[in-house]
Image (cartoon, rainbow, N blue to C red):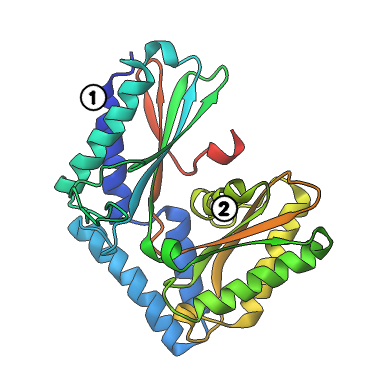
C-alpha cells in the first residue's frame, strides 16, 4: 500500500532538498560556466551564485528569496492506482497539505495571492495553487512526483509567445529566440544566464507549456531525442553564445546555460513559438514511489518522455 503519509513525507523532503541546493547537473554547469567566463563582472556574478548555494545548503535555508510558485508533475502508474491509499483525490489533498506544511516549516515565501484583490492566505494554497499536473502511465507500478518552483522572473519578464508564418522555418525560430534573449536578458530581470526553453508548434496553450517544461524539467546537456530538434537546440545555443550578453545582461561569454526545445504538431497555417527563460534558481527534484513501498530519488523527471 502506498500511504498518503509516506507520500507527504517524500514530497516535503523533496522541497527541502530543492530549496536548499541546486540539482547536480545545474550546479556542475554553473561551476563550468564560472571557469570559462571571460568577463570579470560575469565571473563575480557566477561565483556569487556558487557561494550563495553552498551557504544556503550549509544553513538549510532557501538559496533565493523568491521561493517560487509551487508545482507538481505527477506520473501515476496504472498498476499503482489500486494500492494508492484513498485514490487520486487523496493524493491531491496530500500535495496541498505538503505545500502548506513546507510554506510554514522551511519557511517559504507565501507567493500565491488572489490576482484581483491580492488577498494572501499565507500558505501558498488557492485555486490552481499549487499547480498539479497528472499523466497516467500504462503498466507502471509506481508514482513519480517532480517538485518544481516557478520563479517570478521567468513568469514576469522571461517569457514570450508568437505565431510565425509556416514559411519562417528554422531561421524564423532562431531569429525570434535571439530577439527574445536580447530584449529580456538585457533587462537583467531574468537573473541570467538562463536555461532557455523553446516550445515549437501546438496551440497557444500547448506551445507555452512546452517551453516552460523544456526549461525546467530537463537536465543541462540533455538533447531532444528528435535528431532535428536536437540539432536546432545546438544551433540556438550557439546563436545565443555569439550574442555575448553575459550574466545579468552585462556582457560576457555566458549568455545561457543550455537550450532545450520541445515540439507538438500544429495547424498547417501556423508556426507557434514560445520562449521561457528559467533563471539560475533551478528548483526541481523527482522521487519515484513503488507499489511495494520502495522509493528512490531520480536525477531527472520522466514527464516529457512518458
Percent position of residue 228, x then y: 78, 53
The answer to whether residue 197 shows anywhere in this view is: yes
Percent position of residue 282, x then y: 41, 57
> Which residue has dot 2 on it?
208
Position of 260 with respect to 107 (left or right) is right
Position of 159 with respect to 47 (left or right) is right
Question: Could you tell me which residue is drawn at 19 percent across and 40 percent down?
Answer: 101
Q: Where 184 falls versus 121 (above or below)?
A: below
Residue lying furthest right: 167
Question: Could you tell me which residue is drawn at 30 percent across and 34 percent down?
Answer: 95
Percent position of residue 78, x then y: 51, 17
The N terminus sits in image quarter: top left
> Which residue has dot 1 on it?
5
Categorize mark 1 by other alpha carbons within 10 Å: few (<14), some (14-19), many (20+).
few
Front residue of 155 and 254: 155
Position of 61 with respect to 46 (left or right) is left
Question: Could you tell me which residue is drawn at 50 percent across and 67 percent down?
Answer: 194
The C terminus sits in image quarter: top right
Question: Could you tell me which residue is drawn at 59 percent across and 57 percent down?
Answer: 221
Residue lying furthest bottom: 40
Amino acid at each position: 500500500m502506498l500511504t498518503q503519509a509516506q507520500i507527504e513525507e517524500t514530497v516535503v523532503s523533496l522541497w527541502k532538498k530543492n530549496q536548499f541546493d541546486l540539482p547536480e547537473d545545474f550546479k556542475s554547469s554553473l561551476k563550468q560556466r564560472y571557469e570559462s567566463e571571460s568577463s570579470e563582472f560575469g565571473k563575480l556574478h557566477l561565483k556569487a551564485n556558487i557561494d550563495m548555494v553552498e551557504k544556503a545548503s550549509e544553513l538549510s535555508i532557501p538559496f533565493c528569496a523568491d521561493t517560487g510558485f509551487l508545482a507538481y508533475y505527477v506520473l501515476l502508474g496504472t498498476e499503482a492506482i489500486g494500492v494508492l491509499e484513498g485514490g487520486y483525490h487523496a493524493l491531491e489533498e496530500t500535495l496541498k497539505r505538503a505545500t502548506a506544511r513546507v510554506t510554514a516549516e522551511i519557511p517559504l515565501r507565501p507567493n500565491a495571492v488572489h490576482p484581483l484583490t491580492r488577498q494572501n492566505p499565507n500558505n501558498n494554497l488557492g485555486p490552481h495553487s499549487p499547480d498539479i499536473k497528472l499523466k497516467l502511465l500504462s503498466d507502471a507500478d509506481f508514482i513519480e512526483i517532480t517538485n518544481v518552483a516557478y520563479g517570478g522572473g521567468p513568469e514576469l519578464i522571461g517569457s514570450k509567445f508568437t505565431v510565425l508564418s509556416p514559411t519562417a522555418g528554422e531561421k524564423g525560430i532562431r531569429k525570434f529566440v535571439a530577439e527574445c534573449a536580447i530584449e529580456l536578458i538585457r533587462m537583467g530581470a531574468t537573473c541570467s544566464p538562463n536555461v532557455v526553453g523553446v516550445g515549437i508548434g501546438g496551440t497557444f496553450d500547448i506551445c507555452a507549456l512546452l517551453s516552460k517544461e523544456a526549461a525546467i524539467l530537463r537536465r543541462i546537456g540533455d538533447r531532444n531525442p528528435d535528431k532535428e530538434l536536437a540539432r536546432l537546440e545546438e544551433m540556438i545555443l550557439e546563436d545565443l553564445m555569439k550574442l555575448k550578453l553575459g550574466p545579468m545582461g552585462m556582457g560576457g561569454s555566458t549568455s545561457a546555460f543550455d537550450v532545450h526545445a520541445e515540439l507538438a504538431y500544429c495547424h498547417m497555417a501556423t508556426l507557434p513559438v514560445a520562449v521561457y527563460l528559467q533563471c539560475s534558481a533551478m528548483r526541481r527534484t523527482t522521487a519515484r514511489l513503488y507499489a511495494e513501498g520502495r522509493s528512490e530519488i531520480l536525477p531527472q523527471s520522466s514527464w516529457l518522455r512518458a
